[in-house]
Image (spheres, rainbow, N blue to C red):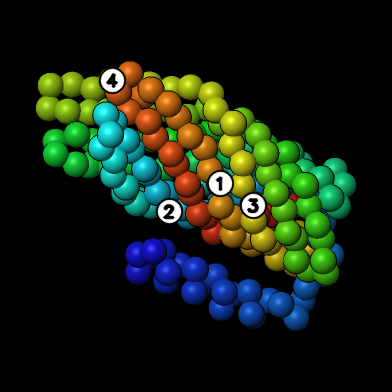
């Protein structure tokens, strides 16, 4: 984990400590949010493989009709990889269901859904894009203080045969803040 991401996470933890005395049960309803991400790409082709990390951001929109259930859409900038004259830039739009275990001000959740990913490959002579639909899954923990919440989560999806050459796995860690509208 790089220093910038660690500093943002530390700032978030200190902010939580300041508002913790005002904590109460989570609000149900529509919510929006945003966060910072760190994605890990594992690329493999013809027996060779490599791994790269990059930072990005996430936008969240969801609906929590019950204490234990939510449905949400995320746009995630997965960052990119630059190596040997090849730039790879990726983003994802996902829709997932969340099963939530609420324990006081803490939400533990698992998510399962579908992701529409888009990857752009750029070299000196031009670029080409490829996209597709894949299953995605993840897990997270959140703290809620009425309408305001913060959370940390991990999400994963895998793609096969990018440009008929690469297989790629993308694991993303994010720290986000959300606001629920009653």
- Mark 3 and mark 1 lie on one chain; the one further toward the N terminus is 3
The percent position of residue 7, horizontal first and vertical second, equals 42, 71
Q: How many marks?
A: 4
Looking at the picture, does residue 176 appear above or below residue 80?
below
- Dividing the image into 4 quarters, which one contains the N terminus? bottom left
Q: Name the residue under label 3.
A: 139
Task: Please say if the residues under marks 2 and 3 sit with CB atoms less than 8 Å apart.
Answer: no
Q: Distance between the residues labelled 4 and 2?
A: 24 Å
Mark 2–mark 3 distance (CA, rounded to whole Å): 15 Å
In this rendering, is residue 133 above or below 37?
A: above
**Kind of element beneath mark 1:** strand
Residue beneath disc 4? 128
Task: Report if the CB atoms under discs 3 and 4 are less than 8 Å apart.
Answer: no
Going from N to C along the chain, the mark reached first, 2 or 3, is 2
Few, some or many residues within 10 Å of mark 2 (<14, 14–19, 20+): many
Question: Mark 4 or mark 3, which is nearer the start of the sequence?
Answer: 4
Q: Where is residue 153 in the image (x, y as percent from the top left)?
A: 59, 55
49 or 53: nearer the eye? 49
Is 81 situated above or below 92?
Answer: below
Q: Is residue 77 something one can see in this rendering? A: no
CA gap between label 3 and label 4 equals: 32 Å
Q: Give me the C-alpha separation between circle 1 and circle 2.
A: 11 Å
Q: Residues within 10 Å of mark 4 (few under 14, many from 20)?
A: few
SS at badge 2: strand
Residue under circle 1?
155
Q: Name the residue under label 2.
A: 38
């Amino acid at each position: 984990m790089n220093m910038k991401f660690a500093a943002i996470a530390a700032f978030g933890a200190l902010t939580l400590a300041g508002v913790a005395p005002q904590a109460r049960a989570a609000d149900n309803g529509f919510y929006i949010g945003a966060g910072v991400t760190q994605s890990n790409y594992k690329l493999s082709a013809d027996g060779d493989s490599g791994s790269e990390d990059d930072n990005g951001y996430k936008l969240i929109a969801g609906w929590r009709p019950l204490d234990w259930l939510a449905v949400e859409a995320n746009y995630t900038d997965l960052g990119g990889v630059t190596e040997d004259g090849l730039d790879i830039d990726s983003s994802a739009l996902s829709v997932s269901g969340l099963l939530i275990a609420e324990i006081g001000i803490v939400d533990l959740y698992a998510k399962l859904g579908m992701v529409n990913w888009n990857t752009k490959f750029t070299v000196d002579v031009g670029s080409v894009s490829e996209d597709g639909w894949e299953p995605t899954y993840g897990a997270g923990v959140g703290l809620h203080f009425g309408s305001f919440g913060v959370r940390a989560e991990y999400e994963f999806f895998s793609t096969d045969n990018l440009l008929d050459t690469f297989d790629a796995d993308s694991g993303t860690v994010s720290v986000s803040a959300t606001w629920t509208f009653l």
